[in-house]
Image: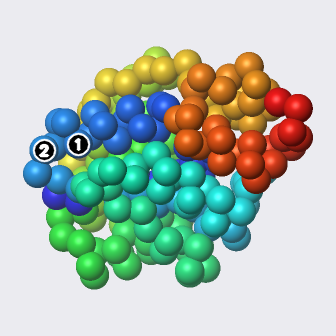
């Protein structure tokens, strides 16, 4: 199985690392493909892809089961389904990881029905969302999904807003990279 875990990773935090480790532990014969969004993804405060990519490399430098994809920076974003279809040309048995907060928004995703029909989900169960009730709305698509419980107070938005207060939520190499490259409005006085 190849597990695709997409996101902004802006910045990658200890919560992202914990989720990857949980996935690798639960699915010991699998790889995790991290799929950071490209620069053309319309998200506020998104720093350059090259920096997010390098920080992910720092987080997983010693893990041969983690693949960090440049795909969404190399193509025009046309929905997660498009990215998964492209990845399926190189990787078999793809499953998509998504947070329970995203399942509430599935109907806004590009070609969401095709995505839900084609790719099994691994739902990170958090945020007190009733996953089974939400997934019942897509029963007609015969969606395959599993749930993994994960709850964390770590939040990339809070890290971006106050790096000094929340630096313990980051891998030390990522923290040092942010300081060295003066990302997220950092100056040398942090």
Locate the C terminus by quadrant.
Answer: top right
Q: Residue at x 24, y 72 (%)?
A: 91
Q: Residue at x 16, y 43 (%)?
A: 27
Q: Where's residue 37, x and y in %?
A: 58, 61
In the image: residue 26, left or right of residue 13: left
Q: CA distance from mark 2 to mark 1?
A: 5 Å
Placement of 80 over or under 78, stated as above or below? above
* SS at circle 2: loop
Q: Which mark is residue 24?
A: 1
Q: Where's residue 108, x and y in %?
A: 57, 54
Task: Classify residue 52 by image quadrant.
Answer: bottom right
Task: Classify residue 26 by image quadrant.
Answer: top left
Locate the N terminus by quadrant.
Answer: bottom left
* Residue 41 in view (yes/no): no
In the image: residue 147, left or right of residue 161: left
* SS at circle 1: helix
Task: Classify residue 86 by image quadrant.
Answer: bottom left
* Residue 80 in view (yes/no): yes
Placement of 24 over or under 35, stated as above or below? above
Q: Residues within 10 Å of mark 1 (few under 14, many from 20)?
A: some
Q: Which mark is residue 28?
A: 2
In the image: residue 37, left or right of residue 106: right
Q: Residues within 10 Å of mark 2 (few under 14, many from 20)?
A: few
Marks 2 and 1 in Cβ contact (< 8 Å): yes
Q: Residue at x 65, y 41 (%)?
A: 176
Residue extending furthest toward the left: 29
Placement of 8 over or under 123, stated as above or below? below
Q: Where's residue 187, x and y in %?
A: 88, 40
């Amino acid at each position: 199985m190849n597990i695709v875990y997409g996101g902004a990773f802006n910045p990658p935090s200890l919560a992202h690392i914990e989720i990857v480790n949980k996935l690798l532990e639960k699915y010991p014969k699998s790889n995790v493909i991290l799929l950071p969004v490209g620069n053309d993804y319309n998200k506020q405060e998104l720093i350059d892809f090259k920096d997010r990519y390098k920080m992910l490399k720092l987080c997983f430098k010693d893990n041969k089961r983690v693949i960090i994809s440049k795909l969404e920076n190399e193509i025009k974003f046309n929905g997660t389904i498009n990215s998964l279809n492209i990845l399926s040309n190189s990787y078999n048995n793809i499953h998509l990881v998504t947070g329970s907060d995203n399942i509430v928004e599935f109907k806004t995703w590009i070609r969401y029905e095709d995505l839900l029909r084609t790719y099994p989900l691994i739902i990170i169960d958090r945020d007190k969302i009733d996953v089974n009730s939400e997934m019942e709305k897509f029963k007609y698509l015969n969606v395959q999904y599993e749930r993994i419980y994960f709850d964390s107070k770590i939040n990339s938005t809070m890290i971006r807003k106050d790096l000094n207060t929340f630096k313990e939520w980051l891998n030390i190499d990522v923290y040092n990279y942010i300081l060295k490259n003066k990302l997220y409005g950092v100056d040398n006085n942090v």
